[in-house]
Amino acid sequence: MLICAVKILKLRFEMFKKVIHGIFGTKNDRIVKQYAKRAAQISALEENYASMDDATLKAEFEALRAQVRAGEKSTDDVLNEVFAIVREAGKRVLNMRHFDVQLIGGLVLNDGAIAEMKTGEGKTLVATLAVVLNAMEGKGVHVVTVNDYLAKRDAAQMGELYEFLGLSTGVIVGGEYDDAKRKAAYACDITYGTNNEFGFDYLRDNMKFSADEKVQRGHHFVIVDEVDSILIDEARTPLIISGPTNRTLDGYIKANEVARAMIRGEAPADPKGKATGDFTVDEKNRAVLITEAGISKAEKLFGVDNLYSLENAVLSHYLDQALKANYLFEKDVHYVVRDGQVIIVDEFTGRLSEGRRFSEGLHQALEAKEGVQIQEESQTLADITFQNYFRLYEKLAGMTGTAQTEATEFSQIYKLEVVSIPTNVPVIRKDQNDLIYKTEREKFDAVINEIKRLNSKGQPVLVGTASIEKSEKLHELLVKENIAHSVLNAKNHEREAQIIKDAGVKGAVTIATNMAGRGVDIRIDDEVRALGGLYILGTERHESRRIDNQLRGRSGRQGDPGESRFFLSLEDNLLRIFGSDKIKNIMDRLGLKDGEHIESGMVSRAVENAQKKVESLHFEARKNILEYDDVANEQRKTIYKYRNELLDPDYDLKDKIIQNREEYISSVLEELEIFDGVNIKEVDKFPIVAKIAQETGEVLENSELEKVDDFKELKEKIIGALAVSYENKMAPIDPQQRKSIEKMLYLQIVDRDWREHLYQMDILKAGIGLRGYNHKDPLTEYKKESYNLFMELVMRLKSDSIRLLHSIQFKSQEEIEAEQRAMQERMESSNAKELAAASTNEAQLKGPDEFGDKKPKRNDPCPCGSGKKYKDCHGKGGPKKGGFAR
């Protein structure tokens, strides 16, 4: 009775909302109405600017720009005039006039919101309005696209309009790492590129050793095209720059053998029940859970007594990743194997993610599974999530055809409101109910029959699949039926744009994995319009309603006719894992024969509810990633701010060195348990002398310290002696050279210790989930422990910097200049775009006893890169701390 009453109340509330919306309109309607008034004011200026010749129009714009840059007017003050000028320039240069609804889209973008505009409504042209207005300030505007092709295309096409108005355009392309070219592109008024390139450039800039080497110049205003794809779909994957760890890889091979020997069981139906087998697979949460029997078997196969003891923690980690690789990740679905390499398939676009690797050893586990060469495990050198990268911008805006389903997440995470812009021409596409079959075989039979029916009359069909595996299966079926078709998936992405463009041609049959080809319009001619337009045939519902809507949205652009329908089966992953038993029970009661389907609104709603469940899980996953990265983000901002201070030519380290020296001596005395209040006369001073000599190379006079009988005096005596020694050593050096050397040494310490800190954070994060078993909140524990780690890092930075400054010794001006050049070369080489080069930076500050198996011989070149022989550089006088010969 209670459930029934709740349902009635919900129904009444929905009816009440409909009545209110019918009278007053939705919130979105009211917002659009306000924007429409502003668009009308802009349109009123059209005749005035249309009457001007090119020179006068350009002069008018330049005058407005000069006023904005001089601070006489704000961009808001000149908005109407600038939008009207851009519209007029678009007509003259591109032969395109901004519709009134496109003006509304431009206003939404300028206000730092998301403009939801249907496919074919001209989002690329809409962006020019807000881009030009915000570029007037001279701080740079970034336009983010989903791939390099679109970045180059949009920069070239819209660049003509910008050039007409005296604005420069640059483009950042993946794989082209010429810093001079990148810096020039960022120096332009407008810069196009992908989210990955912008994010990685930010991380790389914060690994540079000179402010002049940085390519980005700030984060003023950004427009993200296909904002849902970039800020939602890709938000679970952080940007990571990594280097090798030099750890053994044999563990992955052994773990793979153990994983394959284990038997998959079933989770208990009753929470109090017992799972069967050695492990169970939780497909909803994409996790593998080892049973007690499985733990015993694994311990026997590994030859250990306790798999989860501290000394065997690495083994349990290897096994966890091996089980995931073998039982959660499918070849040609989640990854492909090409040229002996495991390459990730982007689950949202179906594209190959060249160069990207799964973290935490999962990629190595997949390589062991597939029997290809296992690449070295990597260590994080720098990382950031897309959420925190795009929060760096003073103003963030976005465009997409599908955002309303994620409006809550955009609002909560990015503080972005979503405004649905009306279409210029009403959408007349027919979206038909889903057809649901019992088995996948029956579904594909029906799909082939539908394609044959449509193809026989020449109506073009775009078939959407959820994976490479399914697209290739469909391809084989079409080949058997002798139906000509094109396949677009991660294995055939080179011709993406052309295949998608041709998808609207009469008789075309195109198979596309997920939503590959976004950003490319599918145009149809009058003959195809007469046939009913482009037919969208979905072979499976995606976990996200947005992806389904994107597929549908490829048809029916700008008032064109079109049709869409999804063919589903109870064996589809979405329905199998998340669907309720309601659909299956209905089909069982109906007693459907082989090949028969059901079609009803109730079933479609059940499918949508399953999608909502998955979307909720993914939202929580993204929120969880952000909550953890927010902790690291504060630390990252602190370190990057400190680095930028060191890169500032006007920043003087003198006071910091004095302060750090005092803190270092305090830590030495504390470590030796010498405190204020202790009887200093009875304290043995030799351990102080020995420790400082060992760590800095500075030899204090023990006899002088023995005369001291007060703690404060002792501390001041030591600090004073070190200061005098340091100043004497640095006295022959030119003041500017001295500042440069001190900063370089500090930067090397910051980078080395920050990398080590990131490694410790990785270890902490990997094991923090286990705290939940002890009834502790993992996130709270992570915050506490990461704070402690960061405070240790801060203290280590101070001490390590002083140790290194005091360790270095110069004998002549030539040696000073040679060492300075060597340091600069080492730092520049550490910035090479080959990520492996980043790891060499670790060796540069290690003593010769720390070079491991690769310890050089006396006459070998020194690994530090100075150009000297090892015996004359780091090998001089035997192993010493601090990394420089004394």
Image: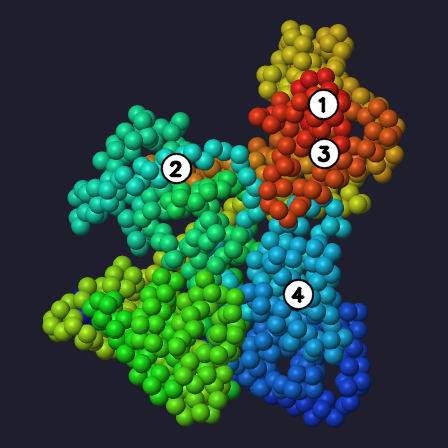
Q: Which mark is residue 859?
A: 1
Mark 1–mark 4 Cα distance, whole angstroms, equals 48 Å
Disc 4 versus disc 3: nearer the observer: 3
Mark 1–mark 3 Cα distance, whole angstroms, equals 14 Å
First reached walking from the N terminus: tag 1 or tag 3? 1
Mark 1–mark 2 Cα distance, whole angstroms, equals 39 Å
Disc 2 versus disc 4: nearer the observer: 2
Q: Identify whether 321 is placed above or below 584.
A: above
First reached walking from the N terminus: tag 2 or tag 4? 4
Label 3: how many Cα within 10 Å (few below 14, some 14–19, many 20+): some
Q: Which residue is mark 2?
A: 253
Contact? badges 1 and 4 (CB < 8 Å): no
**Res 236 seen here:** yes
Mark 4–mark 3 Cα distance, whole angstroms, equals 35 Å
Is residue 724 left or right of 559 when viewed as pictured?
A: right
First reached walking from the N terminus: tag 2 or tag 3? 2
